[in-house]
Image: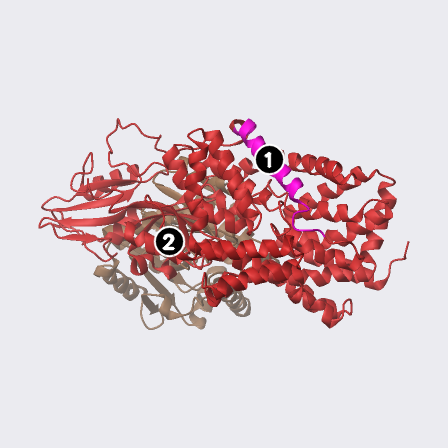
Amino acid sequence: MESLTLQMILVMMMIGIAIFLFIVEWVRVDVVAIIMMVTLPLLHLVTPKEAFIGLSSNAVVSIIAVIILGAGLDRTGMINKLVKPVLKIAGNSPSRIIIAISLTVAIISSFMQNIGAAALFLPAIQRISKVQKIPLSRLLMPVGFSAILGGTITLVGSSPLILLNDLLVPFNLEPFGLFDVTPIGLGLVAGGICCFILLGQFILPKGEILETQSTDNSEDKKSSPIDEETTDFFEVSTPDDFTHYRDPLHVKDLKLRYLVNVLDITESSDFNIVLPSDETEIRSKISLLVSGRKQDVKRMSLNEGMDIKDNLDRYQNHINAQTTGTVEAVIGPRSHFAGKSLQEIDLPDRYHISALSLYRQEKTYLSKIDDMILQVGDVLTIYGNWKHFKRLQSDGDMLLSLPSDMDYMRPEKAVWAGLWLTIALVMIMGFKVQLSVSLMCGALGMILTRVLSIDEAYESVDWRTIFLLAGLIPLGIATEKTGTAAWIANSVLNVIGDVSPITLLTVIGILSTLFTLVISNVGATVLLVPLVVNMAIAAHTDPRMAALVVGLATSNSFMLPTHQVNALYMGPGRYRTIDFIKAGSLVSVLFLIVMIILIKLIYGV
Amino acid sequence: MAIITISRGSYSMGKCVAEKVAKRLQYDLISRDILLAASERFNVPEIKLEKAIHNAPSILERYGHGKQTYIAYIRSALVNRVINNNIVYHGLAGHFLLKGITHILKVRITSNIENRVKNEIKQKNISESQAREMILEDDMQRRKWTKSLYGEDPWDSSLYDLTICIDKLSIENAVDFICKATESDAFQTTEKSIQKMKDLALACHIKAALIDDFPDVGITCEYGNLLVYLKSKDYGNKLLKRIKQLQNDIEGVYSLEIHSGIVIPPEAV
């Protein structure tokens, strides 16, 4: 075994720093990668050319192309149109609906970014939940996990797998084909879905069905139990002498004092103000449509001398599917709203929409939500006219389900989008063209046939993922080049001794699972592949299989809501972290078992 | 109806002015007894509270939270006490501790150093040099204290509504001016100012309840709707549990939310 050199120590230090920064999140993950890209050549651990080779690597180009292809499919709206026929086949059985939607998402995710597929289906799943009366919490987690598992079906399904072939090059190992992982991926998807079908009632929260807002506020109404956090619509009116002997009361005062939002004011002459501004004065003899918690509205009417009606009277017809209502909008993964406050976004001015509450990590926020900085996965309850909701939806910054079917965005381009995707796949499978070249051809085809514009293509690319990949590739090169990977591999083998190939692969699987929970899946892949390949060579195990286990197991991220898909679904599904730990632990263990068994059966390890 | 805070350097006759104002207006007079109230309420030795409110933070203290904790206790006790109005407070840092209450008359009594030295010699029967040293040390500590905790110089006259120098003016003159000022509309209670006071009392109460375990929180309260601000994005279950418990235990709290990852607003307690 080679003795420890200064270069190895430096590489291990850099790996340690990278892991530390990933965990503490002092800087964003892509910034960590850029730090590596710049520091490694300064320390003479890689050449300057090697430092930036990631930016032109096949993996990075493939990911850019996959993202553009996904965006193109998204633009045509064709993916969402799959929902209807799939539901027709599934029928009314909740189990069959879960299986059908999960399988569909998994297959879509096999050639799209997982998070893209998950975000795409979220509004449709919310609609299915309402229509089929299945609690959203029973649907979202199985679908979300299927989106992650679907990324193991093809070599372009997830970033670690896309990266795999590039990481095998220094070892002169045969690259994997596009569908080499498909039997294992399908097995994993099947395992995950079965787990939820058979054990879902034990591991998933019971949840509630999202009803449309009720217009009946009488005590004996039959609806889902109203908890303290639930807001509702109420009609209140002010008496003739409301403004006598008091300081003027404004809309903002009601919000501040009682956390009640005034949505509409109607004066006696039927003059109507929709979404009145904060400075609007509350006058005598007016009717107000307000939204708030029942206890707050009651307190308001008591303190301010207003009358609450038992039911909506004047506003009875106001809230329906055709005119106005509330909807839950989720901040999507690529949303420009993330990182901004509601005050900066100014929904009332831009879209004539009002945000009533914000739901984040098991808590509903009603007070001063305008100051809160929005995060991906936040759920906003918004009120407005359905026309305005559609405009908001088409801008793409929020994911929301509307009562009517979503309009195609560019339905006439659906055929072209499908065609170019097919061409790319044929080039890969039929003509054995390099993955990156084939996928980029497909992406270019979509741009040339105006499925999406070049600017839309640029905008759709997630540069965070690109720089994360590009920046960590030189770290992997440094690990291999300096002999650090071999040194660590031999040290580990000296400790664990002789183990059978299957045991070694299982240990690698567990290591990869643990790593991916704390650092990104790409980071885990780049750091572990050189290490495990060296370990496998030293232990006389197939090194390609060791690398494959890493490429697959770094997608085994279910136990915590750290994966982007889980983070996105946590809010709308009203999941708690413990829900992910419960379900995720089971699925993670199953994942490892199924993966190892299938690798043994298919590759004869 | 008003709340009067009288700030003064040591031996500036501020205490005497405060006593006479309270007597004339028939207001309650409070000073160091507030430390006793805080000590009993929060089970902390009075000497520690006195040190916290008098001495500027040492270098070590600047990195710890001990002083802030004691200040939070004192503030909570003081606000709770003044909520009934008609109070003259002549303890330390009243105008800072009662910041946020709009109908407070903030008075500063000053005197030249020579008169102050004379007063101290008379009272303590010490030498002139000793008296001067003690007064200068005391002034320095108070200025440092205020600057380090609130970023302001207590000698800045813009912090006060009324600054009276007791050199040519007598104590009786000072009392006259102060009593007259309390008749001004600006220092009368209104529905809004009473609400602000109640809100401040609640916010201070919550802050005192949380500060031991969560020293970095900022609390605002508006009409019983409390917001707990945290600079860091993440907070544990411990804070959530405490918040829920406080919401159940304390009357007048209609909602209590945690807003994390946001800059704490300047008006927060």
Quick check: A469 above or below A587?
below
Q: Position of residue A1 (x, y in %)?
A: 91, 53
Report the residue at 57% width, 50% height from top: A111
Chain in red colour? A
Looking at the image, which is closer to me, B267 or A464? A464
Q: Which chain is assigned brown? A: B
Q: Is residue A203 left or right of residue B89?
A: right
Label whose residue precedes the other's in the sequence (1 or 2): 1
Q: Indicate the quadrant where residue A198 lies.
A: top right
Point out the stretch of residues depicted in magenta. Answer: A176-200
Residue type for callout 1: Ala
Whether A267 is drawn above or below B130: the answer is above
The numbered disc on residue A393 is: 2
User: Label 1, on which residue?
Assistant: A190
- Image-quadrant location for residue A236: top left
Label 1 Cα neighbours within 10 Å, binned few <14 / some 14-19 / many ≥20: some
**Residue A115 spot, x, y in % from top left:** 53, 50
Foreground residue among A445 and A570: A445
